[in-house]
Amino acid sequence: PPSPPTLKIMRAATPVAMRLLFASVLASASAGATAAVVAAGDASKDRTITEVVKLLQGLLDQAKADGERDRELYAKYKCYCDTSKKEKEAEIVETDSLVSQVDELKAANSKLSREVAKLDADMIENQESRDNAEAIREKEHAAFVLLKEDLETATEQMTQAIEVLSDIGADQTMGAAADHKQYMADFKPASLAKLKVTVKQALMAASAFVSKKQLVKVDAFLQAPFTGTYTSQSGEVVGILKEMRDTFSANLQEAIATEDKQSAAHAKFMQEMEIAYDTMDAEYMQKQGMLGE
């Protein structure tokens, strides 16, 4: 145990020491409290920072997720745009192609319309040509029939006149004048008049085919008295009549040949025109149907 002096000192020192101790304890307590407060503040601060960090981390994660989602959405949008662009470009190309086809169809339709109109006009012209050709052929044939009839009649009349003149001695085959006069006496006036008429008709028919000089000679022969005095001219007249008959015969043969040639040419022309018409008509119906499609 401490000595009395020590105790005195301690007692004397106790209030001070107690105050110092209290102060020390108080300081220590204050320091501890301060430390505790600081520690508590640090802990609170740590929690705040942690929460901020967590919040920021959450925001960062959210931002990453949003960014990822945005990238996915953008990729889908870009894919949609690219696909739409290709589709639109394809549609534009198809539209241009359709427009081009429409233009081509319009041009083809216009061409078809012109061709149909031309075919129609050509068919009308073809029909008119055939009608005209048929009318001309009918006139040509009618003229041929009349000419043939005239030439055959004239030839027959010339033959009769030649035969009559030959019978009365116009060809100078009779020898004696007395015999000739006797021969002439056997002809009645009516027979002689008929001879003149026959030769006259033959001359009228021959007027377009013989010379004027020949007509004058034969006409003079007919105008002279029908007695034995004209027998010296009859030989020449008979010769002229024979020439006329030969001319008529030749003209008749030429007319027949011409008629055959014209008839054949007409038949060929009509056949070709009918074939052409049928061809145009078939083409016209075909193109008319194409216009209606």
Image: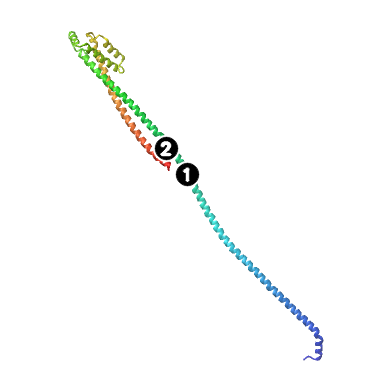
Against 176, residue 114 (above or below) is: below
Amino acid at dot 2: Val
The residue lying toward the viewer, choosing from 22 and 139, is: 139
Q: Residues within 10 Å of mark 1 (few under 14, many from 20)?
A: few
Q: Earlier in the sequence, mark 1 or mark 2?
A: 1
Could you give the CA–CA distance between mark 1 and mark 2, rounded to whole angstroms?
20 Å
The residue lying toward the viewer, choosing from 126 and 178, is: 126
Residue 184 lies, in percent from the top left, at 20, 10
Residue designated by label 2: 116
Q: Which mark is residue 277?
A: none
Quarter of the picture holding the N terminus: bottom right
Residue 94 lies, in percent from the top left, at 49, 48
Callout 1: SS = helix
Callout 2: SS = helix
Quarter of the picture holding the C terminus: top left
Q: Residues within 10 Å of mark 2 (few under 14, many from 20)?
A: many
Residue designated by label 1: 102
Amino acid at dot 1: Val
Tell me where residue 6 sits by quadrant: bottom right
Residue at image coords 28%, 12%: 219
Find the residue positioned furthest to the front. Answer: 190
From the viewer's perspective, tell me whether residue 30 is left or right of residue 130. right
Residue at image coords 44%, 38%: 113
Tell me where residue 289 sits by quadrant: top left
Answer yes or no: is residue 51 visible.
yes
